[in-house]
Image: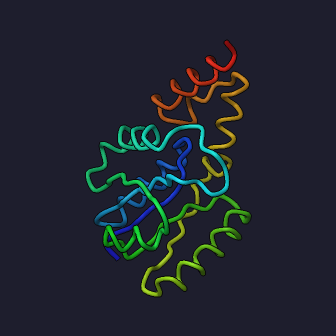
């Protein structure tokens, strides 16, 4: 296993996401972080271009990490970039239930593609993008939960909604 694909909406990217990406970059020769463009479950707060920009800025120190946009099936993007593994972070049992189903479907579509799970570091096990957005929406400080560029953008977005 030398190339990994880390798919997600990253809306927005959190320090928990960056922890998984950094650990993945230490494990694999090449890592592609795939930003889902057409979110199935909910409408993203940030455009795909903004989310790509946040990730590029936040991972620029990781030479073996590239950011790509994911349109369509994750197994097709994995084939396109030459990934032999999908890497997903898990925070809790509820994450596992959903990710297990996705792994089985992906295995059906591409039996050669392995799904690898990285457990969230304990200090990030509570952290979710939706939680960050809720804190920011009500004026709470998210500076220690997301990269600085994201924290500033969240302040801008939610202060403009109040105006």
Q: Position of residue 14 (x, y in %)?
A: 54, 42
Between 31 and 68, the residue placed more toward the observer is 68
Count of numbered marks: 0
Looking at the image, which residue sits at the far top?
A: 163
Q: Residue at x 56, y 44 (%)?
A: 11
Q: Residue at x 71, y 70 (%)?
A: 97
Q: Position of residue 65 (x, y in %)?
A: 32, 54
Q: Which quadrant of the rendered structure holds the N terminus?
A: bottom left
Q: Position of residue 73 (x, y in %)?
A: 49, 69
Looking at the image, which residue sits at the far left?
A: 63
**Figure check: 158 above or below 64:** above
Q: Which quadrant of the rendered structure holds the C terminus?
A: top right
In this picture the colour scheme is: rainbow
Between 53 and 43, the residue placed more toward the observer is 43
Between 132 and 69, the residue placed more toward the observer is 69
Q: Residue at x 56, y 20 (%)?
A: 156
Q: Residue at x 47, y 87 (%)?
A: 111
């Amino acid at each position: 296993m030398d190339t990994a694909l880390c798919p997600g909406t990253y809306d927005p990217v959190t320090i928990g996401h960056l922890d998984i990406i950094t650990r993945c970059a230490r494990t694999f020769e090449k890592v592609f972080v795939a930003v889902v463009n057409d979110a199935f479950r909910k409408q993203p707060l940030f455009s795909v271009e903004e989310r790509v920009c946040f990730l590029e800025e936040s991972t620029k120190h990781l030479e073996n990490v590239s950011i790509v946009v994911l349109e369509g099936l994750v197994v097709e993007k994995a084939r396109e970039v030459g990934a032999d593994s999908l890497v997903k972070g898990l925070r809790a049992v509820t994450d596992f239930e959903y990710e297990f189903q996705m792994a089985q479907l992906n295995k059906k579509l591409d039996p050669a593609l392995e799904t690898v799970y990285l457990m969230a570091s304990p200090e990030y096990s509570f952290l979710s993008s939706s939680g960050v957005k809720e804190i920011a929406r009500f004026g709470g400080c998210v500076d220690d939960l997301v990269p600085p560029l994201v924290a500033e953008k969240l302040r801008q977005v939610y202060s403009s909604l109040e105006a």
